[in-house]
Image (spheres, rainbow, N blue to C red):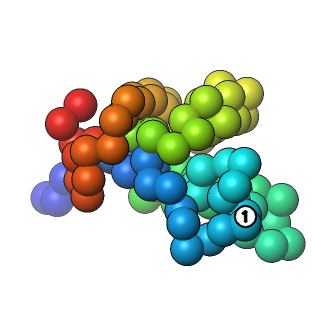
Amino acid sequence: MHTYPTQAVILAGGQGSRLRPYTDDRPKPMVEIPGTGTPIIGHQLSWLAAEGVTDAVVSCGHLAEVLQEWLEEAVLPLRVTTVVETEPLGRGGGLRY
């Protein structure tokens, strides 16, 4: 019998510099996928829930308040907790939290 993970971490703290100008006023996970009306983070959370994940931690950084506000207002398919990297810790630095 296989057991699958029910918890996930999404590292969402980067500046998204390669997606400018779309990330000038929002973090990369909040960029909408054209034609869907849903930001990238919404799709990620739905995909995780579809695979049986029940709890996710989203590690935020750049423009964290925009992402946190959306997560608080959205109807989500799983439980989400956010942590904020107050200073950039580099690749995978958000895992410290």
Q: How many marks?
A: 1
Q: What residue appears at the point 72 percent right and 64 percent down from the top-left corner?
A: 22
| x and y, in percent, of residue 11 in the image | 38, 51
Left or right placement of residue 29 versus residue 56 in this view: right
Residue in front for this viewpoint, 86 or 49: 86
Which residue lies under the disc numbered 1? 22
The C terminus lies in quadrant: top left
SS under mark 1: loop
Label 1 CA crowd tier, 10 Å (few <14, some 14–19, many 20+):
some
Nearest the viewer among 73 and 24 is 24
- Nearest the viewer among 13 and 78 is 13
x and y percent of residue 13 in the render? 43, 47
In which image quadrant can residue 87 be found?
top left
Please tell me which residue is depicted at 17% across the width and 59% down the height of the picture: 2
The amino acid pointed to by label 1 is: Tyr
Asked if one can make out residue 69 in the rendered structure from this viewpoint, the answer is: yes
Could you tell whether 32 is left or right of 7 in the image? right
Say if 32 sits above or below 93 in the image. Answer: below
Q: Nearer the viewer, residue 5 or 18?
A: 18
Residue 46 drawn at (x, y percent): 58, 54
* Quadrant of the drawing holding the N terminus: bottom left
Can the viewer see residue 49 in this picture? no
Tell me which residue sits at (85%, 72%) in the image: 35
Residue in the image at 26% along x and 53% along y: 90
Q: Position of residue 63 (x, y in %)?
A: 58, 39
Up/down of 20 relative to 58, above or below: below
Q: Quadrant of residue 88?
A: top left
